[in-house]
């Protein structure tokens, strides 16, 4: 605990200036300074000891980024003297605490609450670095300050803005399942049910054993295979830190991963997620269909880009360990020449031999704008550079498709929907 002066103490000291001017003697100055110090000391001693106060924090542990959530600081004064308190709750700025400082009066043997409002501006974990409680004396000349042990933690979750596209994709999924139920058995389908034969049914669908038991012709129907495994691999290397519009490439990748997870859960598939570069990250493995979306939102909230290159050999070993043969592997990584030079292309060729492989990339919308510029000489040179970058990117995408990968490349506002549509296309084609 420490004792400090308030601005009011300086104003009180100014009152003595006329006396010093009228009687400019050293002993007069000494008396005035002594009196001033005694008054301040008495005021500090009359202040309630802040170490005897009880402080409890009531705050949510999670909030979706962009939303506002409320909390409270409860201060209990068990002493026989009222307390005039100044409280400073030092959260990091991106936590979005509306007011870090508050003044409150807590009568003796009573409790008061300080309302708080949080609107985080950054995804991830936020914390209170210190909670300082200052008790003011009756005259307001001095205060006694102590740091209270009341840690605060708030996790800002991904906003999942692509959620609004889920109903339309689920409807399309139901249409695919309904259409597949009347078609012949094929790759990516499983037995659905038996029904009576009608004109137009393929005779190869007749179930002769069931027909013999029921003494009427019965056919088998099929549906897209369920309970398939989908492994989402998110590249969290330095390239994911690039800003595309109002968000980073990694935020858009997580948005696409969450939309695919929700859609695959509706299709009855199991979804796992791993983040790869050279640094171990949290993974979501083995969650149930009802919990996987929540687990994924919570796990990815605190993941930030690592300023390293991706070790694709390590990523391939992790994928081989987590995914059985035939599982859908989705790589969320930039489709760009520098990334391919790090070893993505041979790894994609190996993965495509054992798995349906989708490589999803978030395109930079600035390339489209630069490529359209023709205003002056500088704009023309920028347009030429943008066209060259787009040409190299198209070559990389073509190389990935030749080794068996399905490439999805879309700007941030359309990337989640494009990945979901690619998943539905695989379902409709019977490849998943």
Image (cartoon, helix red, strand yellow):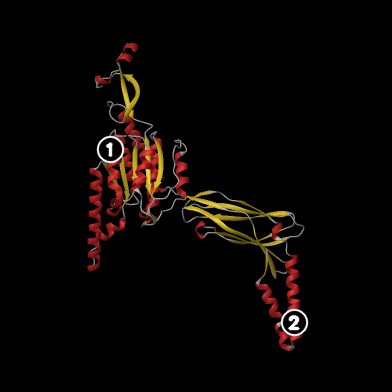
The quarter of the rendered structure image containing the N terminus is: bottom right
Where residue 64 appears, as percent x and y from the top left, is: 48, 49
400 w.r.t. 101: above or below? above
Q: How far from the left and from the top, in percent, is residue 392?
A: 24, 54
Earlier residue among tags 1 and 2? 2
Labelled disc at residue 63: none
* Residue that numbered label 2 is attached to: 30
Q: Which residue is denoted by mark 1 in the rendering?
A: 353
Query: Residue visible at 75% across and 78% down?
Result: 34
Q: Residue at x 32, y 26 (%)?
A: 222
**How many residues crowd around disc 1 within 10 Å: few (fewer than 14), some, or many (20 or more)?**
some
Quadrant housing residue 91: bottom right
Instruction: Please say if the residues under marks 1 and 2 sit with CB atoms less than 8 Å apart.
Output: no
How packed mark 2 is, by other alpha carbons closer than 10 Å (few <14, some 14-19, many 20 or more), is few
Callout 1 secondary element? helix
Residue 402 versus residue 271: which sits nearer the camera?
A: 402
Total label count? Answer: 2
Residue 247 higher or lower than 171, as above or below = below
């Amino acid at each position: 605990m420490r004792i400090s002066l308030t601005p009011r103490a300086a104003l009180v000291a100014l009152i003595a200036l006329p006396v010093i001017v009228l009687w400019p003697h050293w002993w007069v100055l000494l008396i005035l300074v002594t009196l001033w110090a005694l008054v301040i000391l008495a005021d500090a001693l009359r202040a309630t000891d802040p170490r005897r106060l009880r402080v409890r924090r009531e705050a949510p542990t999670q909030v979706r980024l962009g939303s506002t959530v409320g909390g409270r600081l409860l201060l209990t004064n068990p002493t026989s003297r009222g307390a005039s308190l100044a409280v400073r709750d030092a959260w990091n700025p991106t936590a979005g605490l509306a007011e870090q400082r508050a003044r409150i009066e807590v009568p003796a043997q009573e409790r008061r609450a300080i309302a708080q409002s949080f609107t985080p501006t950054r995804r991830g974990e936020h914390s209170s670095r210190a909670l300082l409680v200052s008790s003011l004396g009756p005259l307001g000349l001095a205060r006694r300050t102590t740091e209270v042990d009341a840690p605060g933690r708030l996790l800002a979750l991904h906003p999942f803005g692509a959620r609004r596209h889920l109903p339309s994709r689920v409807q399309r999924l139901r249409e695919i399942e309904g259409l597949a139920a009347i078609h012949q058995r094929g790759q990516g389908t499983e037995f659905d049910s038996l029904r009576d034969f009608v004109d137009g049914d393929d005779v190869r669908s007749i179930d002769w054993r069931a027909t013999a038991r029921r003494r009427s012709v019965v056919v088998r129907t099929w549906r897209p295979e369920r309970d398939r495994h989908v492994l989402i691999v998110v590249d969290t290397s330095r390239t994911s830190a690039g800003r595309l519009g109002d968000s980073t490439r990694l935020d858009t990748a997580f948005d696409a991963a969450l939309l695919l997870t929700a859609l695959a859960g509706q299709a009855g598939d199991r979804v796992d997620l791993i983040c790869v570069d050279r640094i171990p990250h949290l993974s979501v493995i083995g969650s149930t269909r009802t919990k996987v979306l929540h687990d994924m939102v919570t796990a990815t909230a605190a993941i930030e880009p690592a300023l390293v290159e991706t070790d694709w050999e390590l990523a391939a070993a992790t994928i081989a360990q987590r995914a059985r043969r035939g599982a859908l592997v989705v790589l969320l990584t930039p489709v760009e020449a520098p990334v391919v030079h790090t070893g993505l292309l041979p790894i994609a060729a190996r993965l495509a031999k054992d798995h349906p492989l989708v490589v999803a990339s978030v395109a930079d919308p600035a390339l489209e704008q630069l490529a359209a510029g023709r205003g002056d000489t500088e704009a023309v040179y920028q347009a030429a550079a943008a066209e060259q970058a787009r040409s190299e990117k198209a070559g990389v995408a073509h190389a990935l498709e030749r080794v068996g990968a399905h490439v999805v490349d879309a700007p941030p506002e359309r990337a989640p929907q494009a990945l979901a549509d690619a998943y539905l296309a695989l379902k409709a084609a019977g490849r998943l």
